[in-house]
Amino acid sequence: MAGNKSYTIVEYFGGEDGYRCGYCKNQTGNFSRGMWSHTMTVQDYQDLIDRGWRRSGKYVYKPIMQKTCCPQYTIRCHALKFQPSKSHKKILKKMNRFISKGELQKGQEDCAGEPMDSVCEEAGPQELSKVHLKCTALTDIQKDATEFPSTTEVQKEAADATPTGSQTSQNDPVSVPAGRTASTAPKPGNGADPSRPLCRKAKELRKERRLQKEQMRQNGDGVSSTVSPTQPTPSQNSQSKTLEDFISESLPENSAHCLEVRLVPVNFEDPQFMASYQQSAALYAQYQMAIHGDDPSECSESEFKRFLCDSPLEAEYAPDGPEVGYGSFHQQYWLDGRIVAVGVIDILPTCVSSVYLYYHPDFNSLSLGSYSALREIAFTKQLQKQSPKLSYYYLGFYIHSCPKMRYKGQYRPSDLLCPETYVWVSIERCIPLLDNSRYARLNQDPDLGDARAVRDLGRALVLYRRTVMPYAAYSRKRKGSSDEMEVQQYASLVGQDCAERILLYRS
C-alpha cells in the first residue's frame, strides 16, 4: 500500500437468497450477508468478528440471525481463566498415552472431539461461486488503492503497523505431551485374595464419592467417617493440574512417537510454508473425503488454496504485539516426521481465532478437534505474556440448535455475542434463552442498543476511480446514484467505526 497506510478493501454482495445449511441440511434455510475482502487489516477483522462476521478464505460473511434456520452465535473463551474439564483431561491423557506408549484405539471417537466447524459449509458454496463471478480483479483494485490522491474529506486515523521483515516459522514453545508409565500386569496366581475387598468399577466409586460429599454438606460436620483425608483420590490429584501441566509433561526417553508443533505463516513466499504445502494439501483432501464424504473435485488443491491458504489478512507487527506478528497461520502437528493435523488460525489484536482443523483419518480416535483447541488455548495464554490485550480464544460460531455443535460451550468460561447489541454475555446466561428459542437477544437490558450503529452514512469511506472519499462526496459525483440502500445495509452490518475505515469498492 502507499506509504505506511494500510486499508481494508471490500466488495459488498449482500445476499437475499437462502442456500443449503451445513447443519440441519435445509436446502434453502441458510441466510447470510457477504462481502469479498481483497485485503484486510487485522484490526478491522477483529472489529468485524466482534460484530458477528467470519471469514472463509477471502469471503467474509455474517448470518442473518433472525432469518437463518440455524442461528450462529460468535463464541469466545477466556483463555487466561480456562480450566480443562474432566472430558478435556481425558483427551489430553489419551494423547499422552499415545505419544509415550503408542496406544491408539481404532474405531472409537469421542463426541467431545468434534473438529472446528466447517466454515466452508457455513458460508455456502453457492454464495462463494457467485462471488468469484462478480468479483473485480484483485490487481485492478490494488492499483486503485495505491494510486489514489489524498483528499481532505478522508478522516484521519493512526497508521496501521506494517510488516518490517519476512516471517520465519516458529516452533510452538509448549513442550510435547507424554503419557504416564503403565502399571505392570498382575502375575498369574491362585486368584483373588479372599482377605481383601472385591474390586469395584470406577463408576461405582465416583457415585459413592458424590453421595459422601452430599452427606457431608447436609451434616455440616465437614468430615466423612468413610473417607481418609490422608489419601487423596486420583480425581483430586488431576483437579490440581493445569492445562499447561498436561501439555508440558516430559517425554520418556523410549517414547513410541515424537510430536512437534510448528507455527507457519500462511505466506507463499515463506520457505517452510512452501516446503510443506503439497503434504498439507494432500492431508486436507484425505480428511475431507474420509470425514466429510467430499468428492475429490470438492477438495482439490485449488479449493484447499482458496479455502485455507488465501487470506485477506495482511501480516502485521506491532511493538506491543506478539513476536510472531499478526495474520493467518497454519499450526502444523508433525508426528514422527510427517504432518498428521493442521489447525488454521488467525492471530488478531485481542484473540486467537480458530478457522479450521483437518487431520489424518487414521487418528480420528485421538479427538484431535478438541486436542488442537486445547493446544490453541494454551498458545493464546503464551501469546498474552507478550501482548497483554491478546487474551481470548475465538472458536467461531456456537449453534445451540445443532446438538453436534454445542461442544464449543464446554470451553469455559466463555461468552456469546448478542446479535442486537454486540456485547458479550456469559454462556450460562444465554443457554436458558436458547433452550426456549433458536434466536434470542442475549443481552436483556431493554435500553441498551448497538453502540456502533450507523449515525452518519456520509462519512463511510468508498474507493471510486482510484480515489478514497466519503460516501457523501461520492454521492455528489455520482448524481442519481441508486446504491444508497445497499451502502446503508453494508454500513449497518459493519458499524460506524468500520464504515469510516474500510474502503467499499464502487465501480
Image (cartoon, rainbow, N blue to C red):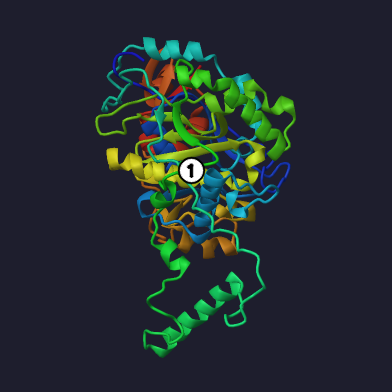
Residue drawn at x 33%, y 11% as measured from the top left = 149
Q: Is residue 158 above or below residue 398?
A: above
Near-viewer residue (5 or 328): 328
Near-viewer residue (136 or 415): 415
Which image quadrant is residue 187 in?
bottom right
Q: Is residue 209 above or below residue 496?
A: below
Q: Is residue 262 above or below residue 270?
A: below
Q: Quadrant of the N terminus?
A: top left
Which image quadrant is residue 163 in?
top left
Near-viewer residue (390 or 228): 228
Residue drawn at x 40%, y 54% as measured from the top left = 82
Is any atom of residue 453 visible in this view? no
- Residue 280 is left or right of residue 349, and the answer is right
- Residue 465 x, y percent position in the rendering: 44, 12
Near-viewer residue (335 or 488): 335
- Residue 14 x, y percent position in the rendering: 57, 33
- Residue 167 x, y percent position in the rendering: 37, 21
Residue drawn at x 57%, y 80% as measured from the top left = 196
Total marks shown come to 1
Which residue, given by chain and number where applicable, does mark 1 sit on? 52
- Dot 1 alpha-carbon crowd within 10 angstroms: few under 14, some 14 to 19, many 20 or more: many
- Residue 203 is left or right of residue 11, and the answer is right
- Residue 312 x, y percent position in the rendering: 47, 25
- Under mark 1, the amino acid is Gly
Secondary element at image label 1: loop
Is any atom of residue 403 visible in this view? yes
